[in-house]
Amino acid sequence: MKLHRPLYCGVLLAALCGPRPTPGPAPADWAFESKVARDALADFEQTMQKLQREIDDAHDDLLAGLRKARKRIKLPADPNEAKVKDLREAERLEAAIAHLEAGDPAPFKRVPRDVYSHRGNQYKLYPDPMTWDQARAFCESVGGRLACIETKDEFKALREYLDAELPADADRNVPETFPWIGASDAESEGVWTWINGASVDGKLFSPGKPEGGEQQNHAFLDTRGIDDHTGTALLPLLCEWD
Ligand SMILES: [Ca+2]
């Protein structure tokens, strides 16, 4: 994961990567000689810093509002005499306050631009290849997870999306065009599960797959379904938000 963080989570995507990012200086290989480029970068950095201040202020306002709401709930000394409704609301507020006080961002869904939507879920193909573990960590770093494909309908829709994302002249039968998805049988050979805990429907495997036995324990999507591969292979990845 560390290897890829600078690649994706530099200045451009700082707003998407990790909790409450603080904009840092541009990477060394962005030390442009062109004045136009340097000026554009300086403008961008200024905007990012301004946005960061606004995010910090909004965070503080939210925390203050939640604390105020909690203060307004007066619970009797004996919890047995409290109304259930008040107790539950106090608990919810206290949990949210603790979350924000720990410095974690408000848990809103963060979905990047240019996602593909299907039946309430969003998906995005990231073409830069990485290992399965790195792909899993990357999707989590942008607020999603490696895609879990649980129905034939979802597979069909995603296949259309992936085909549309590839250049028209791309060879669609080479592994370089197949993305990692979130299934594995690494824990127990032959028992394929999605990272969301669901079992993999055997009917969704590509014909003749899985075939790699103990050598291949991580899933990618080929043109006909789920396929197995060695987790250290470098492939593109498909993230999902729900
Ligand atoms: Ca296996």
Image: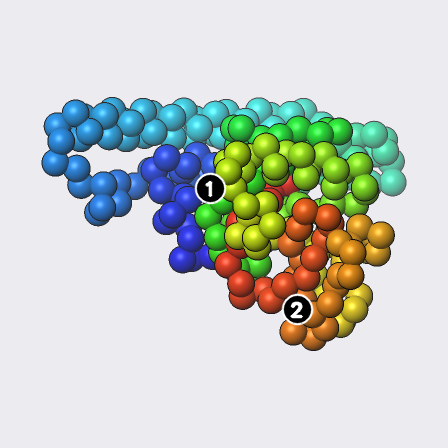
**Element at badge 2?**
loop
Tell me the mark number nearer the camera, choosing from 2 and 1: 2
Q: Name the disc covering residue 17, or none.
A: 1
Residue 96 appearing in the image: no
Q: Under 8 Å from ligand 1: the CB of mark 2?
A: yes
Point 59% across, 45% down: residue: 172
Residue situated in front as seen by the camera: 155 or 103: 155
First in residue order: circle 2 vs circle 1: 1
Residue 91 point in image, percent of width and height = 73, 38
Q: Is residue 148 above or below residue 192?
A: above
Point 41% across, 37% down: residue: 13
The type of residue carrying mark 2 is: Gln
Residue 202 appearing in the image: yes
Residue situated in front as seen by the camera: 207 or 142: 207
Q: Quadrant of the C terminus?
A: top right
Classify residue 23 by image quadrant.
Answer: top left
Q: Is residue 137 above or below residue 21?
A: below
Q: Name the disc covering residue 216, or none.
A: 2
Q: In the picture provided, is 119 more to the left or to the right than 202? A: left
Q: Under 8 Å from ligand 1: the CB of mark 1?
A: no
Point 48% across, 29% down: residue: 60
Residue 162 point in image, percent of width and height = 61, 38
Q: In the picture provided, is 201 more to the left or to the right than 72? A: right
The type of residue carrying mark 1 is: Cys
Q: CA distance from mark 2 to mark 1?
A: 30 Å
Residue situated in front as seen by the camera: 130 or 42: 130
